[in-house]
Amino acid sequence: MIQKILTLDGSSKFLEVLGDSPRNRILDFLLGEINYDFTLKEIANKSNVGYATIKRTWHYFIGAELVKKTRKVGKAVFYTYNTESREGKALRKFYLEIIFNEVEKEIPQKITA
């Protein structure tokens, strides 16, 4: 059973706009946790994507320079969202625009008389 990623106010606006796919879930999670690093297993658990799917698709994130290795502890390799790459910056800007635009839609417009 697939679980939706929930924010404090319900489902992710990013996923509502772009669609709920494994890659989008991974991106949504990484973009929302930009200052932290995680193992692939943690990313799988926190983004509600199967570990096998992470392993199968991770090379796309590496190839597009959307993630980078931060450290290695034993056999565990930690990754973080790459805010320094051109692609990373552009996608982060797009992500924030989606979030802000969707939130603005939910703010009730004040009627001035």
Image (tube, helix red, strand yellow):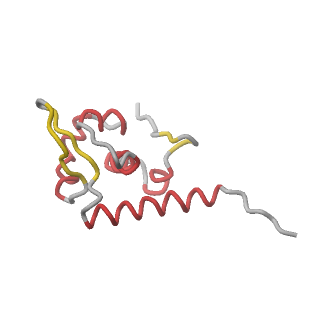
Residue 71 is situated, as x and y percent measured from the top left of the image, at: 17, 41
Q: Quadrant of residue 105?
A: bottom right
Residue at figure coordinates x 24%, y 40% from the top left: 53
Looking at the rendered image, the quarter that the N terminus falls into is top left
Q: Quadrant of the C terminus?
A: bottom right
Near-viewer residue (102 or 96): 96
Q: Is residue 8 left or right of residue 60?
A: right
109 left or right of 96? Answer: right
Residue 13 lies left or right of residue 105; in this view the side is left
Position of residue 14 measured from the top left corner of the image (x, y, whole percent): 46, 53
Q: Quadrant of residue 46?
A: top left
Q: Nearer the viewer, residue 21 or 42?
A: 42
Q: Nearer the viewer, residue 75 or 62?
A: 75
The residue that appears at 28% across and 42% down in the rendered structure is 37
Q: Residue furthest bottom?
A: 113
Badge count: 0
Query: Residue 19: horizontal and vertical position, in percent?
Result: 43, 52
As rendered, which of 103 and 80 lies closer to the eye?
Answer: 80
State the residue lying farthest toward the left: 75
Q: Residue at x 11, y 29 (%)?
A: 74
Please tell me whether residue 113 is drawn above or below residue 88 in the rendered image.
below
78 relative to 65, above or below: above
Query: Residue at position x 21%, y 60% from top?
Result: 64
The percent coordinates of residue 2 (x first, y second) are: 41, 35
Relative horizontal placement of residue 23, taking residue 72 as reference (left or right) = right
